[in-house]
Image (cartoon, helix red, strand yellow):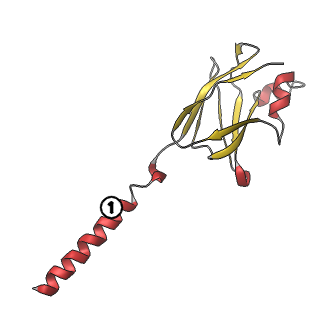
Amino acid sequence: MKLFVTRLSALGLFLAIIGLAGCGDSAKKTTLKGKVTYNGQPLANALIVVNGADNVSIGGSSDGQGNYEVVNPPLGAVKIQVTEPPERMMKGPLKPGLAKIGKPGTGIPYDMKAGDQKFDLAITD
């Protein structure tokens, strides 16, 4: 009987550990949301890329009203780049304000924390 109780306790402990392993922060979703404007006007279809350490980058795009969302961006010190849609970039030079933060190695510094965050991007010339 004693051996049965010991094995049952070990099985219970094992199942509890397995159950707790699925309850970590990895299941939580981090979202960066906001509105991107250029000289006070919503910037539709802009590409928003969050660049973190170790060359980890996650992006999203803005809708017709300039609202954007980036899901599960890298955490910590990041730089947020904003560029015009690729089809617009093929037609000529970038808008001056976007050229400052849209090129590789540039961007708006931001401290990305876990959880949902709101960060509006107001870009001007």
Q: What residue is at 34 percent from the left and 67 percent from the top?
A: 17
Q: Secondary structure at mark 1?
A: helix
x then y, percent, for residue 37: 70, 19
The answer to which quarter of the image holds residue 110 is top right
Q: Is residue 10 left or right of residue 120?
A: left
The image shows a total of numbered marks equal to 1
The residue pinned by badge 1 equals 19
Q: Quadrant of the N terminus?
A: bottom left
Give the percent coordinates (x, y) of residue 94. 86, 25
Name the outermost residue toward the top.
Answer: 40
Q: Of the residues shown, which amino acid type is indicated by label 1?
A: Gly
- The reply to whether residue 9 is visible in this rendering is yes
Residue placed farthest to the left in the image? Answer: 1
The residue depicted at 39 percent of the width and 58 percent of the height is: 22
Residue, far right:
93
Q: Percent x, y for residue 90?
A: 85, 29
- Other-residue count near label 1 (Cα within 10 Å), few / some / many at <14 / 14–19 / ≥20: few
Picture quarter containing residue 32? top right
Residue 68 visible here: no
Residue 106 point in image, percent of width and height: 82, 38
Give the quarter of the figure containing the C terminus.
top right
